Amino acid sequence: MLASWFRLKYPHVAIGALASSAPILQFDYITPWTSFYDGVSQDFKSESLNCFSVIKATWDVLDERGSNDAGLLELSKMFRACKTVKSVYSFRNWLWTAFTYTAMVDYPTPANFLENLPAYPVKEMCKIIDGFPTSADILNKAFAAANLYYNYTGNQTCFQIEDGDDPHGLSGWQWQACTEMIMPMSISSESMFPPDNFSYADRSEECFTSWGVRLRPHWITTEYGGYKIDKVLKRFGSNIIFSNGMRDPWSRGGVLKNISSSIIALVTEKGAHHLDFRSATKDDPDWVIEQRRQEVEIIQGWIDQYHEDMAQISS
Amino acid sequence: MLASWFRLKYPHVAIGALASSAPILQFDYITPWTSFYDGVSQDFKSESLNCFSVIKATWDVLDERGSNDAGLLELSKMFRACKTVKSVYSFRNWLWTAFTYTAMVDYPTPANFLENLPAYPVKEMCKIIDGFPTSADILNKAFAAANLYYNYTGNQTCFQIEDGDDPHGLSGWQWQACTEMIMPMSISSESMFPPDNFSYADRSEECFTSWGVRLRPHWITTEYGGYKIDKVLKRFGSNIIFSNGMRDPWSRGGVLKNISSSIIALVTEKGAHHLDFRSATKDDPDWVIEQRRQEVEIIQGWIDQYHEDMAQISS
């Protein structure tokens, strides 16, 4: 996201940008607010309807069983918490993160971006859920699935479910998401998460409580545009690649069509969150190899053009 | 200047810009620092070498005659000051402004932009100076020339030479020129002004004294570019007209060559500070009429293109 904006605002500093998995349209009313969680849900549903349904049913069961101290203690044991968990919301967040981030990195190759994960991790998670007898405890199923995300390497003996640390430095993003990067996201009743509406007023209160700041929800579209971006950039700007893998729920807020001959959308059906930026591996499918080849070819074209322009000065 | 930057930074808000007399290259080391005062001097020299020489000789004489209270009192009478002037620098600034701003509005039509002035005011000023006998008091010549600038309508009975008001609201610009808009300007020994070097350090001290702020001399080129602007914008950006009249000393810091098919330089040999923006008059020469016609035609093209793009959406 930053790469494309950098190119647009500082064309004298960067001659081009490769913006991979950049949801530059996930602001204001440009993209439907339910699209992110619709995307996560679609990833799971496409692998297994049972898997999707189990996860969808998890939240109510979790709320019920965690409604008192005895329940929380029992859940803490089941979820191998390092310390007894005091709020059912901690379990909820822990599971939520596992499902959401796994969808984001639903690669055809093992991930090492957020956590270590196998190739096609949504498929693997659903295999775990589907491997249980139908009658098994639904929370056992959900825990086993989350275990793939948090403990694929198998070296965790317990989990910091409450007051976990911030290994990915995401608190910086939380601040940004409370000031300039206001992405309204709601959850439809068709998704595998509990339905939820987004409210600017509520978010503003949360942000004020957490950071002492108020939202500037229209800053980003004022500064960088977004509405009718194809019409704007067709006649303005150049040298940007927007690459998106459709398995990434963020792709729904991305640029998925070519805007001009030098503002290009590269869309892959199966990729996920900037897979093209991960190191090449021997397991890369042909379409990832081809995508990276195209990106290098286009960027090489920009550099060649730059050198031609510079040669014209001296001639 | 603002128009072109607005188009570059907010292409989603403005589909095009007409930037007339915009010295966007008068920053850092892009344009020679002496160019502005060289331009003013050239305007006067091109009308009359005597006129140029009289003005060039004025400064030393003024300094000498204003070096004591008796001299200042005498000068105050000669210059019809409303109140006795306490510093010779006030006379100097008063004359300086008259010569500089007259060069800026050296139009073929009467000006009403800064002060009321006749058509071709530099020629008129030089006629006044050249009309004196060679032996006349040089300061009488300079005063008579400045009188054209400050009192063309003839309704001033005395002049606020010291602590004048700010009829054009230029103090706002002074603040801007102390923070983001740092235009280094020095004066060569070939010009009609006393030679002067620009120093970032000295300017910084002046600005701190006046406004309590420090310069950010590289802000403008960091934010908007400027170095190799033709190479940058040839491949990026669209729909800007840079119009310049070469009689305007600011034109030397402007964009004087086409950058691309839609970033266009319109240069007129005789125009001055955004003459094209003044109301049409019956005295307009053909080349001004033609310049305005071209500008309207180009802008109409942008608007037509916009409507075509919009029509494509609905079709």
Image (cartoon, coloured by chain):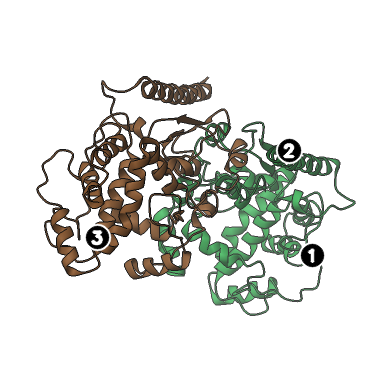
Chain colours: A green, B brown
Q: Residue at the right extreme?
A: A282
In the figure, is residue A130 to the left or right of B121? right
Which of discs 3 and 2 lies nearer the camera? The answer is 3
Identify the residue at the far front of this view.
B135
Q: Secondary structure at mark 3?
A: helix
Residue annotated with mark 3: B90
Q: Which residue is mark 2?
A: A308
Q: Residue at x 37, y 69 (%)?
A: B208
Chain under numbered label 2: A
**Badge 1 density bin: few <14, some 14–19, many ≥20, Cα 10 Å:** some
Which image quarter holds the C terminus of chain A?
Answer: top right
Kind of residue at disc 1: Tyr
Residue A100: x and y, percent?
65, 55
Q: Amino acid at mark 2?
A: Glu
The numbered disc on residue A152 is 1
Residue A173: give x, y in percent of width and height: 57, 62
